[in-house]
Amino acid sequence: MTRYGKLTAWLVGAWFVVSLAASALHLYQAAPGQPPAAFGLAVAAPILIFAAWFSLSPAFREFTMSLNPRVLTMIQSLRIAGYVFLVLASFGILPRLFALSAGWGDIAIGVTAPFVALRLAATNRRGSFMVWQILGIADLVNAIALGTLAPLIDPHGISTGAMSMLPLSLIPTFGVPLFIVLHLVCIAQAARWPVRPVRPVAPLFGSAA
């Protein structure tokens, strides 16, 4: 397990460097009227690689299952930085349609992450824990969708081009897929937790003899 821990740390570090370098080289900036193919690949590829590795390698799967779900959930508190989207929208740097939804969604997840990590990461809160993780993924998927559709919904409005440049480009190309992977690991862990049996309810009235 220690081997997988070191390997995972190196891979995450290399992933960050690649995302940083690609952003610095403007590889994520699509030509006007062209779909952001490189951008989409940067978001989807890490998630697909993780899913394939998780499915095909029992050893890696057991390693991920051994991680502390409270720590993985607490990391999501970093998403409180979504307030940056709100600030940028107020200065006209990002479209409000995208920034307000993505920003407030991230803030909601970031603020509630400590509570979920400390109170819901337990077998007796299994359902609530999984629902919160799913909501966290839904927020990220919603942000990606709105970031992609905003130029189509309002072609003459403010562009989302700032998201393809440093430092903002690191959010969708590194932060978003990493947070999604952490959510998926927590859901997989919770799915293995034993379901506590429902205690029988005592009859309101004694049985007639």
Image (tube, rainbow, N blue to C red):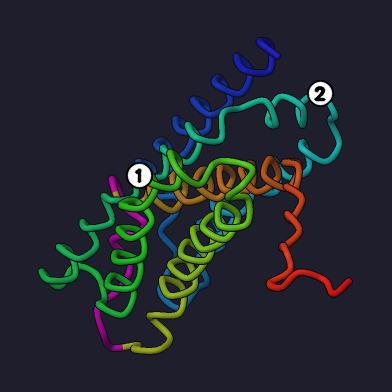
| Image x and y of residue 101, in percent | 34, 73
Mark 1 to mark 2 CA distance (whole Å): 29 Å
**Residue holding disc 2:** 59
Give the mark toward the camera: 1 or 2. Answer: 1
Q: Earlier in the sequence, mark 1 or mark 2?
A: 2
Q: Quadrant of residue 107?
A: bottom left
Give the residues drawn in magenta, as a range. 156-167
Can you say which quadrant of the picture contains the N terminus?
top right
Horizontal side of 100 relative to 193 (left or right) equals: left
Q: Secondary structure at mark 1?
A: helix
Residue at image coords 36%, 65%: 105
Residue at image coords 70%, 48%: 48
**Residue holding disc 1:** 77
Q: Is residue 66 above or below residue 150?
A: above
Q: Tell me which amino acid carries mark 1.
A: Ser
- Main SS, magenta region, reads loop
| Image x and y of residue 193, in percent | 72, 41
Q: In terms of depth relative to the viewer, which is nearer, 182 or 150?
A: 182
- Mark 1 Cα shell of 10 Å, populated few (<14), some (14-19), many (≥20): many
Residue 158 part of the magenta-drawn span:
yes
Q: Tell me which amino acid carries mark 2.
A: Ala
Q: Is residue 12 above or below residue 146?
A: above
Horizontal side of 16 relative to 53 (left or right) equals: left
Q: Secondary structure at mark 2?
A: helix
Q: In terms of depth relative to the viewer, which is nearer, 198 or 184?
A: 198
